[in-house]
Amino acid sequence: MRSVFSDPTVLSRMQPRAPARGWSLPRLALLNGFLIGLALALGAYLPDVAALAQAPVRLAASVALMGSLGVVALASAAGWLGGRFEALLPGVLAWAVAAALIVVLMGHLPYEGRSLAAWLADPRFWGRAVYVFDTPAQVRQYLAGFFVLLGLVILSVVQGYRLEGVRAALSRGRLTARASLLLFLPLPLAAGLGYIADNNINRPLRVAPLLVHDAFETARAYSGDLFALSRETGVNYGAVAGVRDLMGEAGYTLMLGELDLGVAETVIVVAHFDNGAWINCRVLASQLSHCYEASGPYVQGLAGALSGQGTPDCLACTPTPDAATRAWLLDHGRNFNGPPRVTRLAQWGSHVLMRAADLASGYAIECFYAGMTPVRISACREAPAE
């Protein structure tokens, strides 16, 4: 009688399974880092991407794209480096450095990243601090960074053991149910870390334009008293009552204007309408405060500064140039034969580029504005005639 142990097929099944070719530990570690980075990026930036489907917010897509690519690249590099070393410490250090860089990236992108996107879109604003990474933004980065750093370091400690288990569970180079479970096990935690980062860093900058978008659309669709509607819903739709007639049915884009995420958590949202309407809305502590027509300090204010007469009929329309800029405007205002034609050329954040042209001669100047509380003329220059 033939023994089963003499059957080579049975013997091959009883022998320990060798790791599949092509799935070296560094390669698995690279895949692991990529998946963790992808989950982290989805938790951090998917809410911003979803918001884009609801409101036309400028630069939000650029921030989400840059952030996602950066997070995935850093996590992939950390995973690969961790898989190159058999010792635990180098892998943990690689993940710790990558986590610190990810935190810095997440914290700075909503500010410097938006500024960079604005510079690339319009080189005339190159070098201007469109969005400033100030102290409140730093505090929010540190809060999010603590959890992201701690979570990724913990995952790095068990990466080697988990990936060895993944290799052992592979079948002919393919992922089995056990291998998939071990590989995907940390992804919910990584997505949760990204959500914590989003809640601390991105969410305050996303809520404000969404509130303004909701108020605009509600005001257009509701023909009754907005103040009465506010009492019923608890949402301050009355904030747009004063600018309701300016909006019409025209399309519009929204942009973050001035940011102050300190104790008051104030965000000014800028709306540019296709019909020429220019509206600013102030959001305080995630509550819509009020909206107002924004062109006064820029259109009437620049004309008043050139004539030297100011804007006596509109005190809120007077910008605040420094002494040198005020003198420059008065000097070059003599080249205008009458009231200038003032137009907005571009705006990014609280920085606005305005043009004033003489209707008769074509002589023109351009002025940069900075800030919204107060509005300031920061620099002016002569411009070529149209």
Image: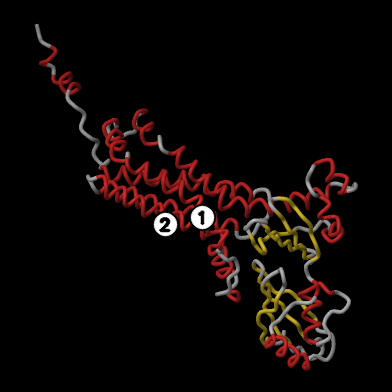
Q: Where in the figure is residue 82, as x and y percent of width and height?
A: 29, 48
Q: Where in the figure is residue 221, as x and y percent of width and height?
A: 83, 47
Q: Quadrant of residue 3?
A: top left
Q: Quadrant of residue 382?
A: bottom right
In-image side of 157 versus 385 (left or right): left
Give the amino acid at mark 1. Answer: Gln
Residue 213 image label: none
- Asked whether 72 or 264 is in front, the reply is 264
- Asked whether 202 or 62 is in front, the reply is 202
Q: Which residue is mark 1?
A: 141
Q: Which residue is mark 2?
A: 101
In-image side of 139 versus 55 (left or right): left
**Picture mark count:** 2
The residue shown at (72%, 84%) is: 386
Of badges 2 and 1, the one in the foreground is: 1
- Asked whether 275 or 104 is in front, the reply is 104
Q: Where in the figure is residue 114, as x and y percent of width and height?
A: 57, 63
**308 w.r.t. 370: above or below:** below
The residue shown at (77%, 80%) is: 302
Residue ranking furthest to the front:
263
The residue shown at (71%, 85%) is: 365
- Quarter that holds the N terminus: top left
In-image side of 344 versus 205 (left or right): right
Are discs 2 and 1 less than 8 Å apart at CB? no
- Asked whether 207 or 360 is in front, the reply is 207
